[in-house]
Amino acid sequence: MTTTSSRGRRRAPSRIGRAAGKAAALQKPRVILALLLLLALTSVMLLDGYLRAEVGGDQRVRTGASSSDVPDDILDGGPILTFRGGQATTVSVPDKTIALTFDDGPNPTWTPQVLKILEEYDVPGTFFVVGSMVSRYPGIVKDMVEQGNEVGIHTFTHVDLSYQSEARVTREMTQTQLALAGAAGITTTLFRAPYSSETDAIDNYSWPVYQELGEDGYTSVFVDTDSDDWKRPGVSKIIKWATPEDGEGASVLFHDAGGERSQTIAALPKYIEKMKAAGYTFTTISGAMAEQTAAGNTGGNGVPGAGAGVGGAAASPLQAAHREATGVTLYEGKALIAAVTLAEWTVPALSVGLMVVGVAVMGRFGMMLVLARRHHRKRNRRRFSWGPTVTRPVSVIVPAYNEKECIANTLASLAKSTHPIEILVVDDGSTDGTSRIAREAADRLGMTNVRVLRQENAGKPAALNHGVRSARHDIVVMMDGDTVFEPDAVHQLVQPFADPKVGAVAGNAKVGNRDTVIGAWQHIEYVMGFNLDRRMYDLLRCMPTIPGAIGAFRRDAVLEVGGMSEDTLAEDTDITIAMHRAGWQVVYQEHAKAWTEAPGSLKQLWSQRYRWSYGTMQALWKHRKSLTDKGPSGRFGRVGMPLVVLFQIVTPVFAPLIDVFTLYSMIFIDFRAALLAWLAVLGVQLVCAAYAFRLDREKYRYLLMMPLQQLAYRQMMYLVLIHSCVTALTGGRLRWQKLKRTGEVGTPAGVS
């Protein structure tokens, strides 16, 4: 920000100020983009579910209702119902004429076979298509129309319209018209209701629907000869049941979808041959209406011109019901087809991703349990030793920026250290009197081993480097200014340096302010997610991170790799990987415990974890060449880095799929099965968490918060990681962010 000098002149913002301002300006759009990605995922899943009748599906079918409100001449009339001039009339198919109709398609297996048979025999058909299937298989419908067949609407989701609201009926028709427009560039005036049969089956509930659709210009089509091929009775019975009596014309029903249709495919050629031999001709519904009009015969109830529909003339009398889709309808239809195509590709891909994530999650749990147990048994057996006891003095570096609430407690805990130490408090340009408070606390505690170093605000890495350069001893312990150590923490932490191959040691960081809901959630995460992970990585010799709250390094090793780098936001991960690449071993010392003040609000937690996640990605990218290196660097690159990428980035990024699919299944598919699956995964996590608590000798009562943690806290961590990925992909940059502290974490003895 712009500052004012003592003379009142305004100074230009510093480089740090400009970078911070730029980063802050970029964060809001990235959060919005992350949320938009989740919204898009949800929308795609809902669209796919709607297409498969999982969302908004209605399996009710009305039977046995009264038809007292339906005119008798309609109940006894032909299979084609029109409302020309507002008057309900029916049309019959002319004698010796068959209008072949097919319901429930298109289907990628059976419909193309039906079309091939019709083409071979030069027979047209009328296909009453389901809009959701049209949008999934638009190419089949395009071929259907180009071959000269006619199409009609069979609703979008194959629901019984007599149960639906007026708005739902309109939506079913409109969406199917859009699907036809996008697939074949047409709309249609023909309609057949799902679960309909002959006109005498019209009842008091469906009759208003037909009237309403008739007012909109639709011609409703029924059947007067049903092959009942859906029952799969055998080829001979299908042919017999589809044959009209006494040379009468008929609207004959077959199915090209909705189940296994091999018998239909086998019966259709034989049926066509039989009917042609009997002198029958084949036409479409519009063709049948045109023949009746030309003959001046409407079957007793029709009107001339009933097949003309509304709109302009069609290209062929056999496709008179078709209208060319233009303007908004055409573009909306194409957009629908594109959206469905996206969903058709995305959801299966997400399903595969879900399986991969599920396997990875369960594999991680298994690895953690097995390797953590081996680690615990190895490090806690009676004869285990790092080597000769390390008793020489070490330097403790405390970087501090505006830590007035915590720095006194930090020094008070170090005053009780059982190991000889010098303490370097590096004040990184604090404006709240941190350095003064540190000196006063040291004087009050009688600590002569404390040095307070001040520097211009330059960030945590610079503060740590200042401390390393000023340290008098060959081992440096690094801690945060809000952290308190147990009395033996330093002594335990430096013992692994008895092994000359060890270059760095990770301590056991604990959440001190765990009595709040947010604190308890983080406590579970620290014990299970961080410390159990560190046991696993330690055994695999690929520890990715020394925690900033408690870690120790050989001073020469730190200087050898160039000190704490400012290249990333996760300087602790960066230096740890650099130590691996330099050939040093990095180990975990579970008995060295420190208590840190975790973020106390969701905003602070988001800020901290966002920095951690993004910084980890930066560090991995920075050290990507370790994947092709040889020696120790290559070992970390080919073992540690893939594990970190898989378990800390890829799996968490895609883990929301588990919750999204679970919630989707609970709402739209099978609540009980989905709930049991979720509880099973929760049970596995509880087992892992309980084992981690046992290893760390923690109280199990905090595990009561775990179900709620899975429902709320984990979702936030997912969003944070997705936000970090978006930032990484868009090239953002952040600086060390200061969290608000309360100083409530005091001496370790007060933590239970």
Image (cartoon, grey):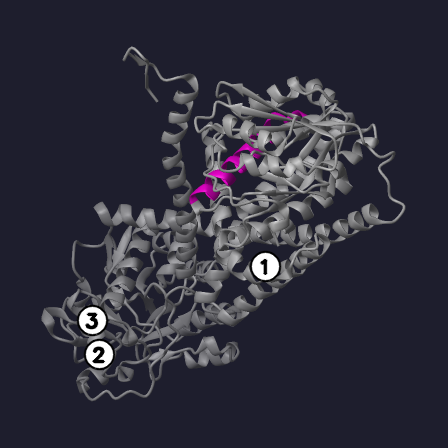
Residues 201 and 669: in front is: 669
Crowding around mark 1 (Cα neighbors within 10 Å: few <14, some 14 to 19, many 20+) is some
Q: Residue furthest right?
A: 383
Camera-nearest label, 1 or 2 = 1
Report, in whole angstroms, how far the alpha carbon at label 3 lies from the one at label 2: 25 Å
For the point 40% across and 67% down, the residue is 104
Compared across the picture, whether 134 is left or right of 362 comes to left
Mark on residue 207?
2
Residue stretch in magenta: 603-625
For the point 20% across and 71% down, the residue is 292
Residues 421 and 737: in front is: 421
Q: Secondary structure at mark 1?
A: helix
Point out the tag, 1 or 2, that comes first from the N-terminus. Answer: 2
Residues 150 and 567: in front is: 567
Task: Please determine whether, in this image, residue 318 is positioned above or below residue 343.
Answer: below
Q: Which residue is mark 1?
A: 702
Q: Residue 426 falls in which quadrant of the image?
A: top right
Residues 361 and 253: in front is: 361
Point out the tag, 3 or 2, that comes first from the N-terminus. Answer: 2
Tag 1: amino acid: Tyr
Q: Residue 142, percent across and down?
A: 37, 52
Q: Residue 53, percent across and down?
A: 41, 65
Task: Please determine whether, in this image, residue 86 is positioned above or below residue 690.
Answer: below
For the point 53% across and 66% down, the residue is 674
Q: Look at the image and say whether residue 605 sits in the magenta stretch.
A: yes
Q: Which residue is mark 3?
A: 292
Q: Secondary structure at mark 2?
A: helix
